[in-house]
């Protein structure tokens, strides 16, 4: 997954956690605007979420953030 998408995921997770608390859930659609202006990036996120990690539709933002940070660290 490209670096810019990882950074966006982390930022959105942090924003959602700050707004709604540590138990907040989200889907990969949370990282995109309502209009599909970058289908390749959307598919990249969907592939990481659904095919690579087999995550449920909604997951805790803390979990997603930790997963992405672990990828950055490795």
Image: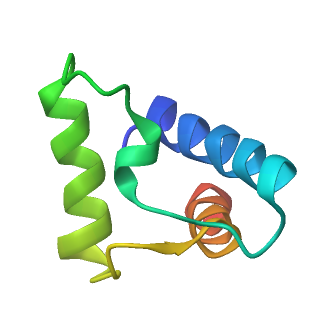
Residue drawn at 49 percent across, 29 percent down: 4
Q: Is residue 38 above or below residue 20?
A: above
As drawn, is 72 to the left or to the right of 33?
A: right
Rendering quarter of residue 17: bottom right
Q: Is residue 74 above or below residue 17?
A: below
Percent position (x, y) of residue 26?
A: 51, 61
As drawn, is 32 to the left or to the right of 24?
A: left
Quadrant the C terminus occupies? bottom right
Q: How is the image coloured?
A: rainbow
Rendering quarter of residue 55: bottom left
Residue drawn at 50 percent across, 75 percent down: 59
Percent position (x, y) of residue 20?
A: 79, 57
Q: Nearer the viewer, residue 12 or 71?
A: 12
Residue drawn at 63 percent across, 76 percent down: 63
Percent position (x, y) of residue 54?
A: 27, 83
As drawn, is 59 to the left or to the right of 24?
A: left
Percent position (x, y) of residue 72?
A: 61, 55
Rendering quarter of residue 46: bottom left
Residue drawn at 32 percent across, 73 percent down: 57
Number of numbered tags placed on the structure image: 0
């Amino acid at each position: 997954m490209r670096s810019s998408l990882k950074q966006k995921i982390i930022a959105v997770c942090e924003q959602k956690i700050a707004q709604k608390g540590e138990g907040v859930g989200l889907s990969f659609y949370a990282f995109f605007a309502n209009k599909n202006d970058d289908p390749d990036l959307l598919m990249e996120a969907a592939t990481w979420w659904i095919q690579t990690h087999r995550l449920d539709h909604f997951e805790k933002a803390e979990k997603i953030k930790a997963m992405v940070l672990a990828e950055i660290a490795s």
